[in-house]
Image (cartoon, grey):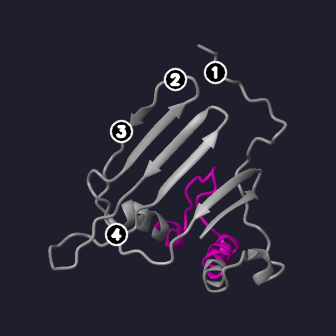
Amino acid sequence: MHSCKPFAECRICLSCGRWGTLERPVVVFNGTKGRLEHKMEEKISLDKTGSVAGAIKGTGTTIRIFPLRAPAYEISTSQVIEDHAGGDELMLRDLFVPVKRDDKYLHAADQRAGAWSILTGIAANHSFLSGKTVEIAGLVPDIPLPDYPPMPTHDSPVPMPPKV
């Protein structure tokens, strides 16, 4: 399934596969200053090798920057050998530690974000079965959108890199 829709002051394009044996997410941001690509590949263990389920492959994470009017470069990443690249630990801390950490970018999901996340998968399944576009908001009306961090508007000035 492939879809491009306006979302939270930007245009988001999703390609979604219903089933895969490995998670290999690729996230791409195209913007006025260039392009950012983030790729991550999990390693899988089908036998008793002792590897952590959901662990990230040692060389499987890359971040590449493609600046406008400049050569591309790669940013080094650190390797985390924990479940889901350390995300499980952060989630458990958010759920069970009474003192909450500062979260100015609103990474921690609330019930609204959880509902929209689940509804995204449900909409994808409906779309796979019907072959049609499914509006997420039409599945369960009146669920408010989650909070989002402040973003520039389309009218905000964007400084451009100088022409070379």
Give the vertical position of 75 relative to 143 (above or below): above
In the depicted view, which residue is nearer to us: 48 or 2? Answer: 2
* Residue position marked by numbered label 1 in the rendering: 161
* Residue type, numbered disc 1: Pro
Q: Kindly report which numbered mark, 3 or 2, lies closer to the viewer in this rendering.
A: 2
* Residue position marked by numbered label 2 in the rendering: 70
- Image x and y of residue 93, in percent: 47, 66
Find residue 157 and report its image quarter: top right
Tell me how far mark 4 sits from mark 2, CA to CA: 36 Å
- Image x and y of residue 78, in percent: 33, 46
User: Dot 1 lies on which element?
Assistant: loop
* Residue type, numbered disc 3: Ser
Q: How crowded is mark 1: few (under 14 residues within 10 Å), some or many (20 or more)?
A: few
Mark identifier at residue 76: 3
Which residue is at a point 60% across and 78% down the rendered structure image?
121
In the depicted view, which residue is nearer to us: 77 or 3? Answer: 3
- Image x and y of residue 57, in percent: 28, 58
Which residue is at a point 73% across and 45% down the rendered structure image?
151
Give the vertical position of 162 relative to 102 (above or below): above
- The boundaries of the magenta stretch are 93-122
Tell me how far mark 3 sits from mark 4, CA to CA: 21 Å
Residue contact at pointers 3 and 4, CB within 8 angstroms: no
* Residue position marked by numbered label 4 in the rendering: 54
User: Dot 3 lies on which element?
Assistant: loop
Find residue 30 and report its image quarter: top right
| 136 on left or right of 142 | left
- Image x and y of residue 158, in percent: 74, 29
Q: Work out whether mark 3 precedes mark 4 in sequence or the reverse, and give the earlier one.
A: 4
